[in-house]
Every structure is written in C-alpha cells, then in structure tokens.
Image (cartoon, rainbow, N blue to C red):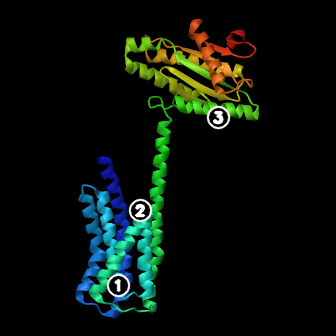
Amino acid sequence: MGNTRGKGLSLARRLYKSRVFGLLLGLMCVSVAMYPLDPPLWVWSLMLFNGLVWPHLAFQWARRSSIPYRAEHRNLLIDAIMGGFWVAAMQFNPLPTATTVSMMAMNNVAIGGGRFLLAGTAAQLLGVGVGLVVFMPAFIPATSPLQLYACLPLLLLYPLALGWICFRQADTLGRHKRELLALSRTDSLTGLLNHGAWKDQLDLAFQRCKRQQQGAAIALIDIDHFKAINDTYGHVAGDIVLRQLSKLLKQNLRATDVAGRYGGDEFCVILPELPLFNAAQAMEALRERFAVLGYEQNPALKVSLSIGLAAYDPSHADATRWLDDADQALYEAKASGRNRVICNSDSKPRQAVLDSV
C-alpha cells in the first residue's frame, strides 16, 4: 500500500509541473481567443481559476488523497472536461481549438496510453456539451494573427516540456532497472557475482574459447575449515573473512578476470587467455596474501585457501565439464592436506603444477 501511494505521489509531482506550465500557456491561448467575444466577468474569473489556481488545487487534492494515483486520474479527467468546455466557449475557433485538443490528447497518451486517450476524449466531449448548453456558440471559421501568435507558445513549448518529463521518467526507470538487474546478479555480502551470474559468465567464456580457439583457466577457491572459524570466532568474524577474500580478488585479479561467490565459503574465478601455469602462479600468490592478511587481522586466526584449477579443454562438450575438472582439482587440494593449489590439466591431471617448478 505504501509503495502504491509513493508511486501515486511521484505521478502527482510530475503532473503538477506539466499542469502548471501547460495551463499557464493555455490561459494565454484561450484568453486571446475569448477576448473578441466579450465574455462576462464570471467567464474571465473561471479562466483565471482554471489557469492559475486549479493546478495547485489539483496537486493538493492528489497529495492528500489516500490513493494519489486515482486522484490524479480524476484530475486529468477534469482537465479534459475543462478543455472541452473552453473549445465550445471559443466558438470552435479552428487554431485555438486544434491546439487545445491536440495538447490534451498528447498529455493523455503520455500518461495512460490509448485507454486513457479514449477516457480523456469522452471527458472532452462532455465538456463541449456543457459549453454548448452554457454559451450556445456559433462557429468562428477564422483565426486572427494575434490568436495565432497566442497559440504558438503552447504549440512549441508544451510538447518540449512534456517530452523532457517523459525522457526523465524513462531514464529513471531505466536506471532503476539496471540497478535491480545488478542486485539480482550480485552477492550482497561480498559484492562479487552470485552463483547464477558467474555460471552465465562461464558459459560465455566457454563459447568464446571455442569460437576463437583461445585458452583460459578457471579456479575454484575454498576457505579451509571455514565452519571452525564461524564456530570459534562467530559468524561476524566469518563474514569478515569472506569480505577480505573478495577484496583480495578484486585487488589482485586482472580487469578481464571474472570473480564470483560460488556458494558458502567457496569462490570462483574465470581467467581468460591465461595459460594454466600462469593461472597457477596467480592463485598461489593469492593464497599467500590471504594467509598473511588473516594473520594481520588476528594473529590467533589461522586462514588458508585450497584452490583447484582447470584449463579450457576443446574436447569438452560444455562448460559443466570444464567446471567438473576444477572441482576435481579442488577436491584433491583438500584431500591432500589443504592450503595448496592443485591443477587439473591434460598433461598432468590432478597434479600440482607448481610443485614441478
């Protein structure tokens, strides 16, 4: 309910600006068209009320309403009724009439599309009917030069203002959409890609390697004995460790590398166009930095990483097989004592490449 009211208030604020500007220009157009007809005082008073007071009254009406969205739709229908009323009052003078009808139609389409255009047109016809009863007008087929110039500001400036408002709204919606998309793909604790988003990037990397016949490596990283860290030092300390690792990944990886949180205490990295040996060196450096960082944060806190690496293999049917190789390497890193980097390659399957250096 609160969110609906907030959206309604946002609509009311946008319409308030366009209504103030549009009715002020409309007052100029209508008053110049009405002047030769010598209308009575009450008509001038109604014109001034409609052009100068009504925009503020309509905004307050919507702002104080429990459902501002519905209140603004009602206000727009009142705008349409008054527009039709002034069309009849001007005795259907061609240019002021066409200007009034087209500007209101454009406004209704911008706000509510074809459905609201129909509703606004019906309201305008109602206003015309009331005007016919009140004024019993004749048709004035000619528009004077003064009346033409009085219509020009409305014809030139109001579409520009309405277009700017629509652009700002579309830009804001686009930005919100991008932000929501980024949030849906980001792990909230670490700021890295989440599991699903990283897997999407892995599929893209696999297809790129296959298409361009280039090499790449992926790494699965596991924080050793992470459950013991949580049990001994608490979950807050565990979260700090996770954030520290994500910070190290961001600081030490290349701009082209893609890091993510695979789940729990497990992280993942795509290393495009990097031979397995160089990828192993990079991961070994990361492992050493992480151990030193943990000691600096808390000397009693022993932290280490087990890392499994796998190179892109053209014989793999899909990225899942590539990931399985890295998972096997990680399993062997943990099974053989943890705190080490193990590589799974064609030439040395599940063997620590760094140990051979």
Chain-order first, disc 3 or disc 1: 1
Q: Which residue is mark 3?
A: 204
- Left or right of 352, for residue 189: left
* Quadrant housing the C terminus: top right
Residue 233, horizontal then vertical, whole percent: 38, 14
Percent position (x, y) of residue 155? 46, 77
Q: Residue at x 33, y 63 (%)?
A: 73
Label 3 – label 1 distance at C-alpha = 64 Å
Residue at the location (59% across, 16% down)? 307
What label does residue 323 carry, if any?
Answer: none
Query: Observer-nearest residue: 295 or 188?
Result: 188
- Identify the residue position indicated by label 2 in the image: 112
Quick one: label 3 or label 2, which is nearer the N terminus?
2
**Residue 137 on image: x %, y %:** 33, 90
- Secondary structure at badge 1 equals helix
Q: Disc 2 and disc 1: Cα gap in Å? A: 25 Å
Q: CA distance from mark 3 to mark 2?
A: 40 Å
